[in-house]
């Protein structure tokens, strides 16, 4: 993939784990809390629903044996 421009935002679904998001982005949760991620910053977003630090991942997927229903395509 050399020679192709690198996107400003990259979202990666980690197998049986969180979404890995590389900014810059503005994330707004259901309570309207705003989280700004600057360029080059990486955050992990909960996908299992068990994180005590939602919307961010705290590793609960590992402790509870989360298995994704399907892989992203």
Image (spheres, helix red, strand yellow):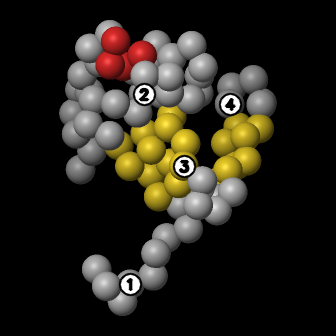
Residue 42, numbered label: 3
* Of the image marks 1 and 3, the number of the one nearer the N terminus: 1
Looking at the picture, does residue 14 appear above or below residue 10? Answer: above
Numbered disc 4: secondary structure: loop
**Residue underneath mark 2:** 47
Disc 4 vs disc 2: Cβ atoms closer than 8 Å?
no
CA separation, marks 4 and 2? 14 Å
**Residue underneath mark 1:** 4
Locate residue 7 relative to residue 48 in the image: left or right.
right
Numbered disc 3: secondary structure: strand
Residue 29, numbered label: 4
Residue 21 at x, y = what percent?
A: 50, 48
Residue 51 at x, y = what percent?
A: 51, 17
The residue mark sitting in front, 2 or 3, is 3
Looking at the picture, does residue 42 appear above or below residue 67? Answer: below
Disc 1 vs disc 3: Cβ atoms closer than 8 Å?
no
Locate residue 32 relative to residue 20 in the image: left or right.
right
CA separation, marks 2 and 3? 16 Å
The residue mark sitting in front, 1 or 3, is 3
* Of the image marks 4 and 2, the number of the one nearer the N terminus: 4
């Amino acid at each position: 993939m050399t020679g192709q421009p690198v996107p400003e935002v990259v979202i990666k679904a980690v197998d049986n784990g969180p979404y890995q998001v590389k900014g810059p982005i503005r994330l707004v949760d259901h309570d309207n809390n705003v989280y700004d991620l600057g360029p080059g910053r990486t955050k992990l977003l909960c996908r299992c629903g068990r994180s005590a630090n939602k919307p961010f991942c705290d590793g609960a997927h590992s402790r509870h044996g989360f298995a994704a229903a399907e892989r992203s395509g």
